Amino acid sequence: MADRKKKDELRPEQIDGIGQLDNPLPTWWVALFNFSMIFGLGYFMWFHLLSKPGLKEELAQDRKAYEQLVAAREQVALTPEDAVARLQDPKLIQEGKSLYAAHCSPCHGQYGEGTVGPNLTDKFWIHGGTPEMILGSITEGIPAMGMVAWGPILGQQKVEAVTAFVLSLQGTKPANGKAPQGDEY
Amino acid sequence: MVQYNDRIAGRFLQATLGWGLLALLIGLYAALELQFWPANARQAVLSFGRLRPIHADLMIFAFAANALFAGMYHAVQRLCQVRIWSDRLALVHFWSWQTLQLASLITLAMGISQGRPLAEMEWPLDVALALIWGLLTFNVFMTLKQRRTQFLYVSLWFFIAGLVGFALFHVVNALAWPAGAWKSYPMFVGLADAVIQVWYEQNIKSFLLTIPFLGLMYYFVPKTSKKPLHSYRLAVLQFWALIFFSVWIGPSRFLYTSLPEWMQSLGLIFSLMLVAPSLGAVINGLLTIGTEDRKIFRNPAVLFFSLALVSYGLFVIMEAMVAFKSIHLRLQYTDWMSAQSHLASIGWIGSFIFGMAYVLVPKLWQQPLYSRCLGRWHFWISFVSLGLLFFSLATAGLIQGFHWFSVEENGLLVHPQFLSTLLHLESYHTVRMISGLLYLLGALVAVYNFYKTARGGQLQDSTRALEEHPMPPPNSRWERWERKVGPITFGILGLVLLGSLAQLLPLPNQQTDLKPYSPLVQQGRDIYVREGCVSCHTQTVRMALKEELRYGHASQGWEFQQDRPALWGQRRHGPDLHRIGNKFPHLWHYQHLIDPQATTPGSLMPPYPWLAKRKVDLTVLPERQNALQKVGAVYGPGDPIELYQAEAKKIQESLAQAQIEVDAEAEIIALIAYLQKLGTEGK
């Protein structure tokens, strides 16, 4: 190219002492510019003219894969009888303690004394007080009362740990306990 | 002989520095609040939701824009070889702009806000801004018309693009119907409004903070380094590509949302294509400075210009990087985006402005700089603080982004609780705060230096001999065109309109029978806007499985169809709220708003005790409903005040069951109603 030779040549216009050289465009810069435009065109054609799978299809696929994972999770989950037996395990209770602090204490209080949600330390339960029933309440939530279904969020194993901890709170009588609600168990 | 009006440039420079210090101080305080919520001091005026927009708006419209005006008045007169067309108009421009900034500061602190990013001020101020901008544009164009040289130097094209472009973006984004003196509802709704907001926001960054500043760069860099511009043709090509491409990049901030996917892809592509033209300016500037003459780096201005250009180049590359969908998904809404915006505002704009001040203060006050050594100290302080600021925020963003998206083998989120993704970031936020403090100290050193310089001299108009430089006749049609203001202006307008209309005309208008928000819910929404909740909470769950696991079903476009304005938000200092409705009982919301730490131990959210005390003025309801009807909401029969009272009573009674006594007209009731309504239609 003839332009290459004209390095550092001053253009005739000048203003306020500012001159302008007529240096050629750097080759790498031109290459970058062209590459980005070709890439952009290719990208758009690939996804929108050739209709390759987009974000919606990707999400649908991910959802399906996740459902399979959930199904697999439920298969390995223990039967309710086994679970109840395991709920006495001190290790599980210890694990449940930190989960409780993070997820349950906002509504049930740091010590289970009850704030927004009911007191968990007395013998009275609104939605059933047997270990299976508590496990069920935590897994499926109480949507009508504003309690979240924790099963899909924490998973079976962690819900069991929380249940174990909640059961261990029975009869601890913390300060400022909320008045009993529900039926005695 | 020609006498330039240098006093006006000097005034604008003084205003720049004053506002700049204030904006930095507010930013520093906001950073403190992010880490230490009691700094909100239980005061509405001091709460983060109100301070953050003030910080951002002052940085842009008071710090950057004033500097732009100072540089423009200085450069335009010299490049046209003529005094500014009207001294009086320039003075009116100066005082009205400062008044506008003060009014914006006061009204935003009072909670008068439209909730639109970088355009929070309410409609009376929007109108004033448009008028003042018109004054400036008129004055500059008249000066151009009277110029004593045929030649239009590249800087002037950049100024024209900034003046014309900003006016257009501002006016379209500000279209709204007033509901009283200090409240309005936008003409656009839902998804369309979200597109307008992001189109405006990204274009402000291009047409106010980049393009006219590049114009200043093309003037001050050759001038200060006393060398000719490296490449004229690079400047030309870079200019037109920048104008055309930057209009399209808005939707690159909305990847994985309910925006049509072809628009998202266009945003990505144009962000990528913008890299080369932007780097064109960077290399043109840096090669003009060159490395042959090392002595010029003793001049703090040259050091700052170099840092500004390098930061700008880095910023553009990073913008393109986060426009890629998979990267965007993980980094959008995290501190990474703050890292980028501070690289632009501190690294590029801030450095450039201080560099320009090191040139202008000695020149305007006709006195050599008090201390170059202090200037270099200022440079190194700024450099270190910029590095610390950038790396702390970028690292925090990476960590948070990966925490949000990390899952265990069984497909469950590792951090299902949002708060636990924030707790790892404390040390990074401390570094960020220290870096902010450092930058502010550097700025104080600079202001001291300028003050000492100015005291030795005097701000006065300078008189120069006219340049006698023969201008060769144009040797092509192109060269004839680029010496004329008209064709250049229309060329710019054409490109900007083409890019804008291509995005705004096929604007998704979702057909839906979604009912308007009830008076109570709408009132709650207005309070949400007033308190700046959007500063920390987004309202759009993106189309990705891990987003759905955390927040609930992905948001669909039609769900926003009654949102005036759209409140999609830009940052997640707290969780997304689009699926918060009906998730918790009213009582939880009440306690959480009054004392967030009681329901969420360790929460960073400040308390909002005034919401329970302040009462909604029910007399504004008919006026607001009327304005909403004007912009397209269709209401059924029924008195808004009665509807409001009936709905509020239910929430009040529900709270009363838990022995909480609160007035039915208390603001907190309306806000709870809104939060409980959010996203319930599309579940």
Image (cartoon, coloured by chain):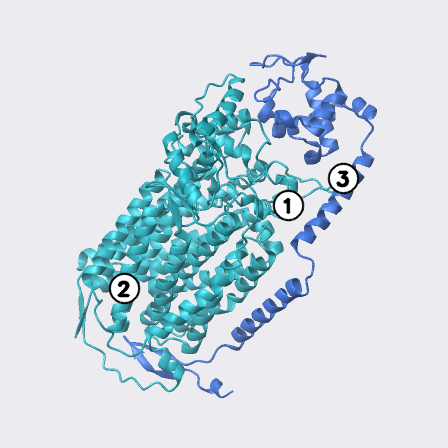
Chain colours: A blue, B cyan
Q: Which residue is mark 2?
A: B138
Cα separation, mark 2 vs mark 1, equals 51 Å
Q: Amino acid at mark 1?
A: Phe
Query: Which circle's residue, 2 or 1, is located before the other in the chain?
Result: 2
Q: Which residue is mark 1?
A: B405
A106 relative to B564 in the view: left or right: right
Indicate the position of residue B669 as horizontal and vertical percent values.
47, 28
Q: Amino acid at mark 3?
A: Val
Q: Which residue is mark 3?
A: A70
Q: Residue under mark 2: which chain is it in?
A: B
- Mark nearest the camera among 2 and 1 is 2
Q: Residue under mark 1: which chain is it in?
A: B
Indicate the position of residue B64 as horizontal and vertical percent values.
35, 56
Indicate the position of residue B175 as horizontal and vertical percent values.
40, 51
Image quadrant containing the N terminus of chain B = bottom left
Q: Can marks 1 and 3 be said to lie on one chain?
A: no
Q: Nearer the viewer, residue B248 or B322?
A: B248
Residue B74: quadrant of the picture? bottom left
User: Few, some or many C-alpha atoms within 10 Å of disc 3 (few <14, some 14-19, many ≥20)?
Assistant: some
Q: Can marks 2 and 1 be said to lie on one chain?
A: yes
Q: Nearer the viewer, residue A15 or A44?
A: A44
- Mark nearest the camera among 3 and 2 is 2
Q: Residue at x 39, y 60 (%)?
A: B168
Q: Residue at x 49, y 58 (%)?
A: B504
B464 relative to B167 in the view: left or right: left
The label on residue A45 is none
Q: Residue under mark 3: which chain is it in?
A: A
Q: Secondary structure at mark 2?
A: helix
Q: Amino acid at mark 2?
A: Phe
Residue B115: quadrant of the picture? top left
